[in-house]
């Protein structure tokens, strides 16, 4: 035997070859451990292969590439079907049964070392809501102590048995990642879709191997599913969608807008990016356990809903809001994250007067397409719904800045009418104000419906008096301008007070 590598706890070998496994199911990378220490079974060497044909080296994709490498390292360190049975408790004692040789027993069914119910447990969901009824659904969950503590805290569900594992995919995906429906952008789910984060839940799993002590302060925040309760974490996405609809509440993070022309975008929950609902129509009915809709607003025939589902099959075909990229001839032109200046559209195509930069957030439009007008032309763009705009928080109110024009949000769902001239066109559209507290701190109390009704009544009165003043034949031109200024101040005062 050689001397090994001095002062190394773990050796990781990386290759980049287009192997046969790379050609299966659009695999981006795969990894495994190579060697374990004799005393406590801890992996001390691992290998990852990155599939060259599936990896982008463009600057905007660097973050995703780095996340992929981290993802594969974690598989080699312990998040793997071949290592679960070697996990130990906090005292270093094995959690699974051992054979005469001191190693876990190999399961013919699993084709891997057999783990105990102290590590992974099968849970039956007997009332899993699907289209036209319910089915029985069996799932596998990591039930080690720290993982259970973290998932219960994350979802705010004290009854949650553990963290659900992925039940789809081929070898290397099935049971070796977190369930995509439940943990969407946690980096240890089975496929990358957007904004990967390494959460406290993944660090808890590494602690529960018995081999590591993670630094939880370095965990990244996972917004998906946070505090959404047992109805989100333990039940189907159809149950969540139907329950929220019945209460007149948003069905986020799931969605029901079919992805088709013209595209209708919306904002991610944290308003960091413009996004699309990934709901699409398939050529045939989905399997019954993946049929998540009895009703879809834009689908007239309810019998057709069996063919509709999210584009990410690992998420149980549950449709959700997803960031995206604009492409031209399969070449990425720009992304949809608001914070990156390079995502600004070229002036000729900036129909909704968006601005991407470090001080931008996503705001929804109303249900009408934006228009561009000249004296001789009117045109509407074939996608709309949301956009990125510069904002600031001042005196307890949210303000948007569009082409150096300031617009103030006085209450949630207030519609800001925009009519601005830019790039030889008059741009006409509407931006909907979110609740101030979603973006700013120290916000003024939101106006009630009665406040708004009263303010609108005063606004109508002021406008009537203004028009009298403005249109009166004896009113000098200068005075009419003063009338206009007074009107704006009065309206502003009414909403602020």
Image (cartoon, helix red, strand yellow):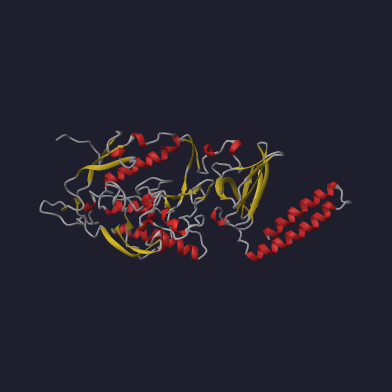
Q: Position of residue 282 (x, y in %)?
A: 41, 49
Q: Which of 100 and 283 is in front in this view?
A: 283
Q: Position of residue 479 (x, y in %)?
A: 84, 49
**Residue drawn at point x = 77 percent, y = 51 percent:** 485
Q: Where is residue 310 in the image (x, y as percent from the top left)?
A: 42, 51
**Which quadrant would residue 204 be assigned to in this image?**
bottom left
**Residue drawn at point x = 37 percent, y = 36 percent:** 55
**Which quadrant would residue 126 be assigned to in this image?**
bottom left
334 horizontally vs 460: left or right: left
Figure disc tally:
0
**Residue drawn at point x = 68 percent, y = 36 percent:** 424
Q: Where is residue 70 in the image (x, y as percent from the top left)?
A: 34, 42
488 horizontally vs 111: left or right: right
Q: Which of 265 and 361 is in front in this view?
A: 265
Q: Looking at the figure, which quarter contains the N terminus? A: top left
Q: Which of 437 and 56 is in front in this view?
A: 56
Q: Looking at the figure, which quarter contains the C terminus? A: bottom right
Residue 116 visible in the displayed image: yes
Residue farthest toward the left in the current orientation of the protein:
100
Residue 221 visible in the displayed image: no
């Amino acid at each position: 035997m050689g001397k090994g590598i001095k002062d190394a706890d773990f050796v990781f070998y990386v290759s980049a070859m287009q192997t046969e496994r790379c050609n299966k199911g659009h695999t981006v990378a795969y990894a495994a451990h190579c060697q374990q220490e004799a005393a406590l079974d801890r992996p001390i060497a691992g290998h990852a292969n990155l599939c060259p044909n599936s990896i982008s080296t463009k600057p905007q994709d660097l973050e995703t590439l780095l996340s992929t490498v981290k993802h594969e390292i974690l598989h080699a360190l312990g998040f793997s079907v071949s290592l679960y049975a070697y996990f130990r408790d906090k005292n270093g004692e094995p959690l699974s049964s051992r054979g005469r040789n001191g190693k876990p027993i190999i399961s013919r069914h699993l084709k891997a070392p057999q783990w105990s119910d102290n590590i992974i447990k099968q849970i039956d969901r007997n009332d899993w809501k699907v289209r036209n009824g319910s089915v029985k659904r069996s799932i596998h969950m990591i039930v080690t102590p720290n993982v259970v503590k973290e998932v219960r805290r994350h979802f705010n569900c004290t009854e949650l048995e553990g963290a659900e594992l992925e039940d789809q995919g081929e070898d290397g995906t099935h049971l070796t990642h977190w369930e995509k429906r439940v943990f969407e952008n946690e980096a240890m789910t089975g496929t990358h879709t957007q904004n990967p984060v390494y959460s406290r839940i993944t660090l808890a799993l590494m602690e529960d191997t018995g081999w590591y002590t993670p630094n939880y302060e370095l965990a990244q925040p996972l917004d998906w599913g946070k505090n959404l309760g047992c109805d989100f974490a333990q039940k189907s996405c159809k149950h969540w969608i139907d329950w929220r609809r019945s209460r007149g509440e948003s069905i986020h993070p799931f969605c029901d807008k079919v992805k088709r022309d013209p595209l209708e975008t919306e904002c991610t929950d944290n308003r960091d990016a413009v996004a699309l609902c990934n709901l699409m129509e398939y050529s045939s009915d989905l399997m019954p356990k993946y049929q998540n809709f009895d009703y879809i607003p834009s689908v007239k025939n309810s019998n057709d809903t069996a063919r509709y589902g999210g584009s990410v099959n690992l998420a149980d075909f549950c449709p959700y809001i997803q960031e995206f990229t604009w492409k031209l001839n399969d070449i990425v032109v720009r992304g949809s994250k608001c914070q990156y200046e390079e995502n600004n559209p070229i002036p000729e195509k900036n129909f909704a007067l968006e601005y991407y930069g470090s001080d931008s957030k996503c705001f929804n439009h109303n249900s009408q397409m934006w228009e561009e007008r000249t004296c001789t032309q009117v045109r509407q763009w074939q996608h709309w719904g949301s956009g990125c705009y510069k904002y600031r928080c001042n005196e307890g109110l949210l303000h948007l800045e569009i082409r150096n024009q300031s617009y103030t949000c006085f209450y949630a769902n207030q519609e800001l009418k925009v009519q601005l001239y830019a790039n030889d066109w008059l741009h006409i559209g509407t931006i909907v104000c979110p609740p101030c507290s979603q973006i700013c701190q120290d916000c003024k109390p939101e106006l009630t419906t009665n406040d708004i009704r009263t303010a609108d009544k005063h606004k109508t009165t002021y406008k009537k008096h203004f028009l009298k003043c403005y249109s009166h034949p004896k009113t000098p031109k200068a005075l009419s301008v003063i009338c206009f200024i007074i009107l704006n101040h009065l309206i502003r005062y009414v909403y602020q007070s």
